[in-house]
Amino acid sequence: MGLIPYKNEVYLDWSDEENVSAMNAALKDVEGQLGASYPLIIGGKRIETDGEILSLDPANPSRVVGKLAATTEREADMALDVAGKAFESWSRTLPEARARIMMRAAAIMRRRKFEFLAWEVFEGGKPWNEADAQVAEAIDFLEYYARQMLRLKDGVEIYAVPGEESRYFYQPMGIGVIVAPWNFPTAILTGMSAAALVAGNTVILKPSEFTSVVGAKLMEVYEEAGVPDGVVNFLPGYGSDIGDYLVGDARTRFISFTGSMKTGLRINELAAKQVENQRWVKRVIAEMGGKDAMIIDDTADLESAAADIVKSAYGYSGQKCSAASRAILHTDVYDEVLAKVLEQAGALKIASPSEAGANVNIGPVISEPQFEKVSDYIDIGKGEADRVLGDDPGDPGKGYFITPTVFETEGDSRIAQEEIFGPVLSIIRSQDFDDALKIANSTPYGLTGGVYSKNRDHLEQARHELRAGNVYFNRTITGALVGVQPFGGFGMSGTDSKAGGPDYLPLHMLARTVVEKF
Ligand code: NAP
């Protein structure tokens, strides 16, 4: 297949007036579509249910972004049957044809980019630059996995003994249940599903209850791109209602999950139990939470370090699994870095991204439960540490806004150990580099981590000893690029599946060895 080489989608430049007007036009257009209803889609058929999910604008919770039919076990059962039948033909469709459909989906998403951004802004409360990075990542996943499938379609080279031919190749697995979080509603749902689909599996898309409209938009893209009926089935619903059913059913072959540690462990446990008529050990790909740390030593460029702490801690209000929620500062530079962080974090602009334009740094947190959770952690922090920046959260009825918050604390405090997933940063003092690494490695998580240093020995030590799936030196620790920074954690952060990397697709396939004696 003649293809241009893979390259990452370029981010929009918001100093360009054309982009700003295109975005404002898309926001206006999407505003006119708010409140619409979205049915389930099973085997290409639109299906209404008795239940309803209301998706709200977190910056203005009285505004309904969309109303989604809520899946019950009845429709989940129907979808598993349909996906099973569709597997028979999709698994035999040529890999090249599957890859073409993914690249067409990328082209459609690129054409609809501003519209996707606008949905992200209204439903996810994303600042424009964050929404853009996310949609670019979704496009990258489609393009990258299509090319990875073409690379793997004939298998990989192995050796043979004289008189025999040995082949090693991959086959599709079966039905995949794709369970996504709300924080990257386009990118993660697209990435997990595109990998499963291009590998020849059929899927059930289960978006987060908070961002299901974006899920419905992705479904439109797949349909327009030509994914056959039944190969992708759109099942919005409450995880607590249908999650166990989908995960536990004998027809499910694998679960691709991204979300919290608690849900990931529950899925892992349930998937491990054999049920009647089950003929395989279910595979679980689980990407979970983080408590990510940036270490600043006494040789670091303190200006850049402080700027990158602020970017990593407060981008999308700290609601990234990769967000810096701990900054571990060497005692000799502690006061200087803290002062710079406070100055820059205190200057971030907080507002509704659908109303205040491209310069918003901090939008709302996603939902009332998330607002309550972060508020509770701020109270816990006030009890066990010193709050040096941030206000008490206000009235959630006016939008789920929480100001950037900084605590000076100890490495073993609750706010420094538990995932908060909000704009709350713990600053911790270290005595030397070994001490800093010890603090960084003291949580059960292992997702991202960073070191700011000019000391080569420190960087080499951290390269091996900082316990994180993605380690970054002298830069931010968020915003992994597809194909450039394969992403995923270990420990309690997940199964180390490395989305956007060369090892990801084989997780969605069965490897076969076939030997023929001549
Ligand atoms: P969550 O509460 O665990 O939910 C994730 C998904 O699981 C949602 O679609 C949810 O449905 C569903 N779910 C809930 N209970 C279920 C069950 N029993 N069986 C099957 N599915 C079930 O996580 P979240 O709050 O959406 O997302 C934030 C978390 O994701 C954070 O911990 C963050 O660190 C993590 N995350 C990790 C990565 C990574 O790559 N490692 C990336 C992004 C986010 P409902 O929405 O209906 O509850």
Image (spheres, rainbow, N blue to C red):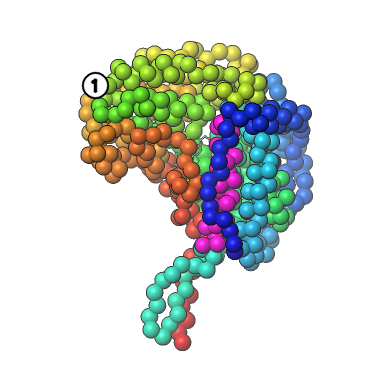
Ligand 1 image-quadrant field: top right
The residue lying toward the viewer, choosing from 510 and 369, is 510
Q: Which percent across, then down, holds residue 65?
A: 70, 29
Say whether residue 345 is magenta. no
Instruction: Tell me what residue is drawn at x 63 percent, y 46 percent.
Output: 205
Instruction: Tell me what residue is drawn at x 57 percent, y 32 percent.
Output: 13
Q: Total marks drawn?
A: 1
Local crowd size for mark 1, using a 10 Å CA cut-off: few (<14), some (14–19), many (≥20): some
Q: Which percent across, then down, holds residue 87?
A: 65, 61
Q: Which percent across, then down, holds residue 289?
A: 45, 37
Horizontally, residue 427 falls left or right of residue 279, namely left
Q: Secondary structure at mark 1?
A: loop
Is residue 146 at all visible to an observer of this figure? yes
Q: Is residue 380 above or below residue 506?
A: above
Q: Which percent across, then down, holds residue 349?
A: 53, 18
Q: Is residue 296 above or below residue 70?
A: above
Give the residue type at disc 1: Asp
The magenta segment: 128-151
Report which residue position mark 1 lands on: 332
Q: Is residue 269 above or below residue 34?
A: below
